[in-house]
Image (tube, coloured by chain):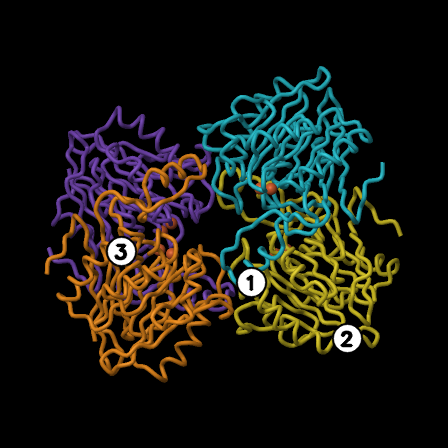
Chain colours: A purple, B orange, C yellow, D cyan
Amino acid sequence: MRILFIGDVMGEPGQDMFVETVPVLKRSLHPQLTIANGENATRGRGINETVYKKLLKAGADVITMGNHTWDNREIQDFISSTKKLIRPANFSAGQVPGMGHTIVNVNGVKVGVLNIQGRVFMNPSDDPFAVAEGLISKLEKEVNVIFVDFHGEATSEKEAFAWNFDGRVSAVIGTHTHVQTNDARILPGGTAFLSDVGFTGPYDGILGMRRNSVISRFKNQMPTRFEVETDGQQALGAIMIDVDDRTGRAKKIKNIRVDPDHPYME
Amino acid sequence: MRILFIGDVMGEPGQDMFVETVPVLKRSLHPQLTIANGENATRGRGINETVYKKLLKAGADVITMGNHTWDNREIQDFISSTKKLIRPANFSAGQVPGMGHTIVNVNGVKVGVLNIQGRVFMNPSDDPFAVAEGLISKLEKEVNVIFVDFHGEATSEKEAFAWNFDGRVSAVIGTHTHVQTNDARILPGGTAFLSDVGFTGPYDGILGMRRNSVISRFKNQMPTRFEVETDGQQALGAIMIDVDDRTGRAKKIKNIRVDPDHPYME
Amino acid sequence: MRILFIGDVMGEPGQDMFVETVPVLKRSLHPQLTIANGENATRGRGINETVYKKLLKAGADVITMGNHTWDNREIQDFISSTKKLIRPANFSAGQVPGMGHTIVNVNGVKVGVLNIQGRVFMNPSDDPFAVAEGLISKLEKEVNVIFVDFHGEATSEKEAFAWNFDGRVSAVIGTHTHVQTNDARILPGGTAFLSDVGFTGPYDGILGMRRNSVISRFKNQMPTRFEVETDGQQALGAIMIDVDDRTGRAKKIKNIRVDPDHPYME
Amino acid sequence: MRILFIGDVMGEPGQDMFVETVPVLKRSLHPQLTIANGENATRGRGINETVYKKLLKAGADVITMGNHTWDNREIQDFISSTKKLIRPANFSAGQVPGMGHTIVNVNGVKVGVLNIQGRVFMNPSDDPFAVAEGLISKLEKEVNVIFVDFHGEATSEKEAFAWNFDGRVSAVIGTHTHVQTNDARILPGGTAFLSDVGFTGPYDGILGMRRNSVISRFKNQMPTRFEVETDGQQALGAIMIDVDDRTGRAKKIKNIRVDPDHPYME
Ligand SMILES: [Fe+2]
Ligand SMILES: [Fe+2]
Ligand SMILES: [Fe+2]
Ligand SMILES: [Fe+2]
Ligand SMILES: [Fe+2]
Ligand SMILES: [Fe+2]
Ligand SMILES: [Fe+2]
Ligand SMILES: [Fe+2]
């Protein structure tokens, strides 16, 4: 099967880009499963139900989250009643709403989707290696294909995680830095890996935020309100992975990057 | 002019890859200026004179450093007597050996090379924006072309830095994460930008270190000695930038990545 | 002369405690100079002019700040027009409003008051050692008595700072952790030192904030709004230092702690 | 019963101070249980068996540890075969040698001793609140008296932890900052609390390390080897707690500090 994964959708500009571009990508690439990280989808901070439904309608099958999971309180109203939205599994020993993994049926093939958050340079969370070990041990009895969105900052932690689970999951794709990396590869055991898929939103902001406030904060450390950049054009960061349904091994991994300098050619 | 910049050379495997590959790249791409980050060149930690000379002989014109600058004490023996090795300019108000910038003559054109270190998720250093502002203000009176190696962790800080100096420097290229990013672009003012150029060294380690010790540290937090991975094949991360000698504006930026999955085709 | 320094005044409860207790302390101890840290004075975040004036009226001669300096935007309206309110000197190379030191006249004796912020486990700021070196070098030509409020987290940095300037300043008193330490001493060179003076505000909160929200954040990492605890009784943390006006050497240092378990006995 | 707890014993100077002073304290105070933190006992980094036995012989009944637990590899040779040495319970889901709690018999009364490490400004570890909840839930069925050494940096986390378990444990005493705090109190539920007990070792070092290297690191960020300060006199930081054997409630808590400025008066 072919999996398409789209990086952190950022505010209204990100939603717009998603709604415009994902259908085009799907017509062109024919993924059977489309996953998107939605931790910044509503005004850059978390996701509410309206936006969640908008992303599903525009083509997402599963939404993953990250450190911004709880930023929008409305998520608590619907996260427990859906199987299509997951938050990092290693949050607070499960004493918080929602789930960290889900199983979706893709044309008769069951696929496990797992969301894990890193600990290096991030807020404290439960041990990502131990929690993932527990979940993957269970999932691998039930499914052949497992996709992991590893939401983290440090490249070392992302690489260590991917190598550690090489051969046991089909893909480990990083999110959080909002910058796509150029290290897509298939590890020897068959796990597709990319340190970060990048984000979907304003091309001329800083990680999607308005430039001036971010720069001014760096220069004088005085508080400024960060808002999603609404001027200018948009970019989309994604990855395409082909997986052998039976073995779960990745066969192909391909960066996708759409922006004004790199318009998508069908 | 054409500038070739090679990311953090890591230990003996990185040196070997550098010595083998850089001459090939130079024959093929004809850069007039070749710069390399050498903060991990000697056994992964700092650089000593032997290795410094080896990299120069193999084709580097200038060596830049980063947070590992002082890891090898031998650097203190020669950093003050060379203009071809610079360390981050925003170290300790200049109360440490060496310089944070240099000017090199490239076929009659003077080029400023600047090394700056970020502060987010890094050890404390002087304000990178303020120090760079001071140095660039001086350099721009003397040279038209300025290349900056911004050694940092956080993508936000790298983007903010590049946008802040857009139009005043020819290129801001990030180092430190050891993973090449896929966001090469020329900003509206003419500054070539890449968040991280990646590193040069073991392809199957974790950031160049032996996998087992890094993974085991992540799993049990017990101390392990990190050593450069010496088995397996090597990778090289680099970027090529074409700059208008007169205006200093970048005209072209192109990722270069050489590894077993992506052998270099001349 | 005798100096009385009162730790971080926290919100309305802290103001009330200050207004009630400082006059009592002054009647009893007869300090010639009273300094207070006001970084949390207005609703726990920064200080506005009304509260600033209230603290002066209640007995403070100088107000110092810390990492919360800019939390209340109103400070920008009056910080530049007063010599009685200072913020950490090592902020943004002086490119922000206000000053990091002041000189006050205490019965004909000039006293320098300096506010410095640490860098360990804190937001980035300029080098506290270098900035303090510059300021103290100037101040010591003009005054014999220098008082430093070092606003920082790490005990190592506070001790290193105090030992580094031992003999050149009369006192280095820490703030920021909101917990008074029990290490008051006079270093061999004559500098009075205390790692942290503690705070002034709710005795039954967590660092002055409402317990439940802080505990719940620690347990589930979900966002909660931290508000100053308004129930229950108050505490005050202070230090008294006697300094030789002529030599600037400290002669005595004495912890002061007033709370329901330790009512002040005149 | 009376419990005496002695803060981080630091290197040979700390051992010497311990051997000299603890017997004096015991003759004078008559504690039934003596606990000491030994994370820095062997050359400032971890503990080996020789030093462990020396501290027991000099009067300790139980040794607790902290973030330096694994610094000395020799601990792995004996930690699993003793019930008198514990390391933080929230390390790596128990996948490391040793235990995080122990039960000791004090004249027929069973006492639980628990070692927990904080996560704020510390290396990642398992959730201290969740792990402690699990252990205390079990321990409180078996013992009436529980003593917790909470090894952490941030005052907020220490206070939150103590308030959260108030009434369920007899004492929460902090370690790690090496500076004794002046906030000893008994919380309303009966839990004795002190943010930090301070350390035992060189009085004129920086947290026990040689001053010059620490200061020079702060000033120029260049690597220096930190060694335990061996010149000068020693200090000891401790706390005495009286607990009702039947209810487990603390009845009294008293700071103890012995140093050249505060010699111990029997
Ligand atoms: Fe994000
Ligand atoms: Fe994120
Ligand atoms: Fe590096
Ligand atoms: Fe680096
Ligand atoms: Fe404060
Ligand atoms: Fe503060
Ligand atoms: Fe310690
Ligand atoms: Fe410690």
The quadrant of the picture occupied by the C terminus of chain B is bottom left
Within the image, what quadrant is residue A111 found in?
top left
For disc 3, the marked residue is: B15
Residue A4 in the image: x percent, y percent?
20, 45
The lab-note entry on whether marks 2 and 3 share a chain reads no
Chain identity of mark 3:
B
Q: Which residue appears at 55% of the width and 48% of the height?
A: C225
Tell me the quarter of the picture where residue D194 sits.
top right
Q: Given contact means CB atoms under 8 Å apart, are the residues at marks 2 and 3 in contact?
A: no
Q: Amino acid at mark 3?
A: Gln
Q: Secondary structure at mark 2?
A: strand
Q: Secondary structure at mark 3?
A: helix
**As drawn, C15 above or below D39:** below
State ligand 6's quadrant. bottom right
Q: What percent of the width, then of the height, locates residue B175?
A: 33, 59
Residue at the disc numbered 2: C110
Count neighbours of disc 1 (C-alpha within 10 A) and say few if under 14, some if 14 to 19, many if 20 or more. Answer: many
Disc 1 designates what residue? Answer: D219
Q: Nearer the viewer, residue D114 or C134?
A: C134
How much space separates mark 3 and mark 1, taking CA atoms? 33 Å
